């Protein structure tokens, strides 16, 4: 890429590492240095993702997040300061080299090309589930069992819509950005009542720095939970007023029931309004504009509220257990500036494949492949899996696979273990 700006300081790693914050943000991509200080707030994936790589080589993350690289490079060209001076140690890293080759192999195999029939069928089955929920109350009446069954069906449709919006959010379906954005708004807004912008802001950060404390918003952090070996000890030192983290494995079950009621859905509108993402507000409200006219005339206000509570409580459980199952128990720590593959492998494991597991988790059971290649259509994960295993074996990286039951149990056991670390640290501090 041709240099477009000039700086007085030499573009060495010693200089680049000093530009590592939002007001002074430089990153390196493929041996070229970019100043993103003035542009970061306009980044479609959120400014925090860029800040995470301030003063670092972001080549692997850049390759992993972007499909249309030619288009993206046009926007990057005016931000280029020039070529990195001296040797880039990242380029000699054998894991980085082999992962780059693995990605090129996946591209040659056509594994980033979507099967549109797969996504059409997935959307159709969601609409059939929603229709079944409506017909259950239309013909089954407003009795408790009818409302319960309808709530179960709606929760199922909601979560399956959640997996579909995840596909559009990761730009893994269409070739054009505007189509991905439109269908992401439809699936997360109209079908779920959530926010496209909020999801991207949180989820891209999770992928950018998986299981990295103070960067990954998906790992269970204070004030509700403490996990790993570092976080519990640090929290024990902070304050005398704290939650009983030694019981966190028990109250996790309660938290997962209410997660989508208060913490997430309240932030949907707050985030959208603060960021002036009015399209998110409109699509989120459209869900309720459809839901209420469909069920209020049949059920009345009180039973419609009961239906909504059943739907959200079940959906919340489903969402929390599946999204936490493949990271909890893995390495949690501070920034190490690892290679993309090493970071993802250290923080992620897989759950066994199978028709039910694939459907129930939206193919997030193949979470290793998803984290290595976030824009790859999920129906292709099983095709790249043998090659990923081969690279892992070569470099001594663990490719761990558990059953669905083991993965769920692992969440509670890891929370219990982390709570015990906090309790021990708390007791030690109290003695002084």
Image (spheres, rainbow, N blue to C red):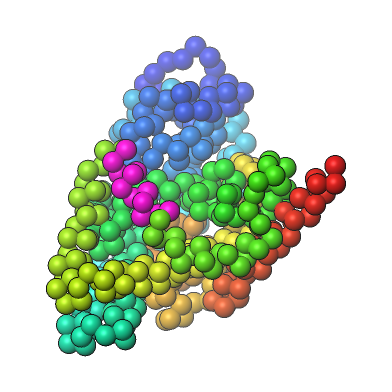
Q: Is residue 273 visible?
A: yes
Residue 227: x and y in percent read 64, 55
In the foreground, 86 or 28: 28
In the foreground, 227 or 96: 227
Image quarter in which the N terminus is found: top left
Residue at 33%, 44% in the rendered image:
270
Among all residues in the image, which is located at the extreme top? Answer: 8
Residue at 60%, 30% in the rendered image:
87
Q: Is residue 160 visible?
A: no
Image quarter in which the C terminus is found: top right
- Residue 103 placement, left or right of 74: right
Is-magenta flag for residue 271? yes
Q: Which residues are magenta?
A: 263-274
Residue at 54%, 72% in the rendered image:
351
In the foreground, 275 or 357: 275
- Which image quadrant is residue 161 in? bottom left
Among all residues in the image, which is located at the extreme right? Answer: 432
Is-magenta flag for residue 358? no
Residue at 14%, 73% in the rendered image:
297
Residue 171: x and y in percent read 33, 54
Residue 262: x and y in percent read 40, 56
Residue 101: x and y in percent read 51, 53
């Amino acid at each position: 890429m041709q240099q477009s700006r000039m700086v007085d300081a030499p573009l060495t790693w010693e200089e680049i590492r000093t530009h590592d914050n939002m007001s002074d943000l430089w990153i390196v991509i493929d041996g070229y240095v970019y100043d993103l200080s003035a542009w970061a707030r306009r980044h479609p994936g959120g400014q925090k993702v860029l800040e995470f790589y301030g003063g670092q080589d972001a080549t692997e993350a850049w390759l992993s997040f972007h499909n249309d690289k030619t288009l993206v490079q046009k926007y990057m060209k005016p931000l280029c300061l020039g070529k990195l001076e001296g040797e880039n140690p990242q380029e000699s890293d054998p894991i980085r080299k082999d992962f780059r080759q693995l990605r090129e192999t996946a591209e040659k195999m056509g594994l980033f090309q979507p099967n549109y029939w797969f996504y059409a069928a997935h959307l159709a089955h969601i609409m059939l589930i929603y229709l079944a929920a409506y017909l259950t109350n239309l013909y089954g009446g407003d009795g408790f069992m009818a409302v319960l069954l309808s709530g179960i069906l709606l929760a199922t449709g909601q979560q399956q819509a959640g997996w579909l919006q995840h596909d559009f959010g990761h730009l893994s379906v269409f070739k054009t950005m505007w189509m991905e954005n439109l269908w992401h708004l439809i699936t997360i807004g109209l079908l779920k009542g959530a926010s496209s912008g909020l999801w991207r802001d949180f989820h891209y950060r999770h992928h950018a720095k998986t299981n990295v404390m103070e960067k990954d918003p998906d790992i269970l952090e204070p004030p509700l939970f403490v996990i790993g070996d570092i976080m519990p000890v640090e929290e024990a030192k902070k304050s005398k007023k704290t939650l009983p983290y030694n019981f966190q494995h028990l109250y996790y079950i309660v938290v997962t029931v209410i997660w989508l009621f208060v913490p997430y859905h309240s932030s949907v509108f707050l985030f959208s309004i603060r960021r002036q993402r009015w399209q998110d507000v409109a699509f989120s409200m459209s869900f309720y504009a459809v839901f209420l006219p469909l069920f209020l005339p049949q059920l009345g206000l009180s039973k419609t509220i009961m239906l909504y509570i059943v739907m959200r409580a079940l959906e919340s459980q489903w969402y929390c257990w599946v999204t936490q199952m493949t990271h909890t128990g893995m390495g949690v720590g501070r920034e190490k500036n690892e290679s993309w593959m090493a970071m993802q492998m250290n923080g992620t494991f897989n759950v066994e494949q199978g028709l039910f597991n694939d459907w129930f988790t939206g193919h997030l059971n193949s979470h290793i492949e998803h984290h290595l290649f976030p824009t790859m259509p999920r129906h292709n994960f099983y095709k790249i899996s043998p090659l990923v295993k081969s690279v892992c074996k070569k470099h001594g990286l663990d490719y761990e696979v558990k059953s669905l039951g083991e993965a769920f149990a692992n969440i509670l056991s890891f929370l219990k273990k982390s709570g015990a670390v906090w309790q021990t640290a708390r007791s030690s501090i109290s003695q002084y």
